Image: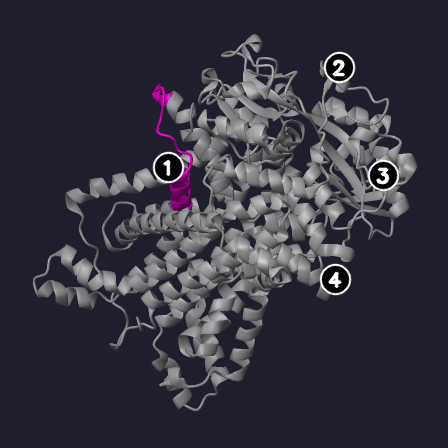
Amino acid sequence: MLGARPAPVWLLGAGAVVGLAAVLPAAYLAVVVFGDFSAALETALSSRALETLLRTAALTAAVVVTSVAIALPIGWLTVRTDLPGRRLWAVLCTLPLVIPSYVGAYLLVAALGPNGMVQEALGVDRLPSIYGFTGAWLVLTLFTYPLVLIPLRATLRRIDPQLEDAARAMGRSPLEVFRTVVLPQLWPVIAAGSLLVALFTISDFGAVSILRFRSFTSEIYIAYQSSFDRVAAAALGAVLVVAMLALLFASSKVRGAKAVHRLGPGTLRPAPPYRLGRWRWPALAFCSLIVLVAFALPVGVLIYWASKGISTGSTSLNTIAALGGNSLLIAAWAAAIGAVAALAVAALVVRYPSPASRLVERLSHAGYALPGILVALGLVFFATRAVPALYQTIALLVFAMTIHYLPLAIGPTASSLLQLSPRIEEAARGMGRGQAEVFRTITIPLARGGMMAGAALVFLHAMKELTVTLILSPIGFKTLATDIWTQTTYGFYEASAIPALVLLAVAAIPVYLLSEQGAAPP
Amino acid sequence: MKLPFSQPQRLLAALLVFAAVVLAGCGFSTEDSGGGSNDSGPEGITLYSGRIPAAIGPAVDSYEAEADRDVKVRFAETADLAATLVEEGDASPADAFFAQEPGAIAAVAEAGLLTKLPQNILDMVPARYRDPEGRWVGVTGRARVIAYNKDVVSESELPPAPFGLTAPKWKDRVGWSPASSSMQEYVTALRARYGDDRTRQWLEEMVDNGAVSFPDNVTIRDAIAKGEIDVGLINHYYVAQAIGEEGPDYPVAVYFPPGGLGSLMLLTSVGVLESSDRKPEAFAFVRSLLSDKSQQFFTSSSKEYPLAKGARPDPSLSVPINQIPVSDSSLVDLKELQGTIELMQESGAL
């Protein structure tokens, strides 16, 4: 059995490099924390920190549960049923991912807030308050549930219908078949998607600050912006890293090392779609509601603002094109490097499970749980000391983006490797090929789907990233995201709508491709 | 037989490769200073700016033209830049730091990163608008005021000091931003003038009276404009800017409360980094910010108070600058700021 072999040295080396790179921000936290350990400990263990941690945990749990509750039906409807226009729904339901959480939160307040557009349209005196837990829960769910939906749909497509046929033949109802046969096969991918949603939720700052929910990242920003206390900020960041490790552990328990590849011979038979019959109406209503709230409404507000912005003539198309080019450059490089780095980690974890490979996996998740400011400051700290020539260059900015978003690429790559039977690789080894050759000729080509999906996710998030760009970019380097920030700092929402729409349009390309992932018949 | 790539994957790969290669090939585009003028002279100083391009660009441009030097500006949140400067230490590429908030420049000064400014620069600004130790000077001032919706509230109803906003009449009608540094500077000044007990009492009464917390000044202003709340504690110039954008029908007006430090002056300030190897140029830049021309730009564009001696505030600023109080407490003392945070946290405001 291949899994029992020790990992080849070159793969372990590559994984170690990736893991060490990704752990730099966390290492910076350690340096600061140990610089004044007693003060750090006092902050980290204060009742205030613990309360905030519990509050953040509650938000995270709620966002994960609702994300799954939205993604699961949409995934099933768009892959396994005869829902009218299901490919279009798949694309539309994936698109909310392109909306940055801070933009989404602003738009939600504009639309659903007190005296907002919806209230005026309905002509009522008062709507339920969207501030606090409710608003943060809503925004984070609406704009992150696609992180569960995307891998879920990919997995649903590859599920072997033979098991379901067998269960049905034994007289089980469709619901029972789903619960006892389909769902167990989906748990690993739901756990992987949930992990990404959870880590995003705990590291988000944009949405929670606008919606006035005091999460853990708010405390970190208060430590920086109010008392300029780097030790307190680092101590709180270290708590987030620990929380991340706990989430990763929980997720890996659910995922297990489950083999989800097929054992039978032959090619996968496409599953016949379930007929929805009358149920297609509620199904369509559900999909429409989600698309309306998570995509049509925010984009509608942006288009409205943009039309006002154009009429005042404040935007130059040349500038927007240059900003778009810069965003694209950073995002494309981060995506490409992230995909390769993720392959090393995923291959280690899936094919050569060992304490060392699990350590590499944990290290490489460290940057995603942290808010952007801590990732940026960590690299400021190390780059100015170790590689001053690279400080505030495109290379360092791409590096920062890559380690910040690496887990987004690891998940899908690991999933696609899990679905591959190691027997193919074993067979190639049996024919006398070396480990490196097998990796190059078999593993990489078969993992390409997952790598592409991972690259697209990194691309998308790097497009939206703000704080890391502001601090680590070469001087004078602006992107769509920094332009949106510049405009909204003083509340010029109309002027910010055009770069926001361009950002959405560019980011929509990988999202479209993600939703089509594996759509071609196998 | 499965193709190695499905069609969408090929498209995606092509897109990424195209983007990376083409863009790397033709380099990336950067813009010059905030103003966007591209007549680059010889390389000059690097500025870390907490002010956005529109709020500093023309002042930088005018220095560039006079000095025939090209200033490079990094724009980000003031607090993030302060934290960045602290981590960079001696290796900082920055020569000067322009802070929106006094706490941020105090943190950088406290870390020993700012050099003492020459006396001829310090002399350009009245002593009450600069660091007693001479490490930074104020450039512009913003007054903490009460903004109100003039369709709902008349100015005569407003209390003579923010202390009065705890009256039952204002229940659930007041917005504030406890997490913003400007609100915290105000609380620090209250503590210095009226003591911790009186300040704590006011904070607790505000919380009990249903004061609504917003993340920053802009969101308070917009909430007043939308009628979400009726009054709010903000910096005066945000309203002037909105009136400039939206016209005279804009529903929000400002009121300078005469008592209780109601219109406290908050400074934006500039300092020169100790690690800079272009100190003479950086000093020249600071002088330029305090020149008539730049001071005029600041006050006429963003309606802030110009702080250089002899500079004239914009005619729209009807309250004379000498009627606006400054804090008794030394805003450079970070321990005071820490104490403020703790007080605000204990009283439930933060």
Distance between the alpha carbons at the discs numbered 1 and 3:
50 Å
Callouts 3 and 4 in the same chain: no
Q: Specify few, some or many for label 2: CA neighbours under 10 Å numbering under 14, 14-19, or 20 or more.
A: few
Indicate which disc, 4 or 1, sits on the residue closer to the N terminus: 1
Distance between the alpha carbons at the discs numbered 2 and 3:
26 Å
Disc 4: which residue? A388
Q: Nearer the viewer, mark 1 or mark 3?
A: 3
- Where is residue A164 drawn, in percent x and y? 17, 64
Q: Type of residue at label 1?
A: Val
Residue located at (49% from left, 30% from top): B204
Q: Is residue A254 above or below residue B297?
A: below
Disc 1: which residue? A293
Q: Is residue A121 above or below residue A255?
A: above
Distance between the alpha carbons at the discs numbered 2 and 1:
46 Å
Disc 3: which residue? B285
Q: Type of residue at label 2?
A: Pro
Residue A136 covered by magenta stretch? yes
Compare residues A10 and B94 and report the one nearer the observer: B94
Q: Is residue A402 above or below residue B205?
A: below
Label 2: chain letter: B
Q: Check the image and name the residue furthest to the left.
A: A171
Label 4: chain letter: A
Magenta residues, start to end: A121-143
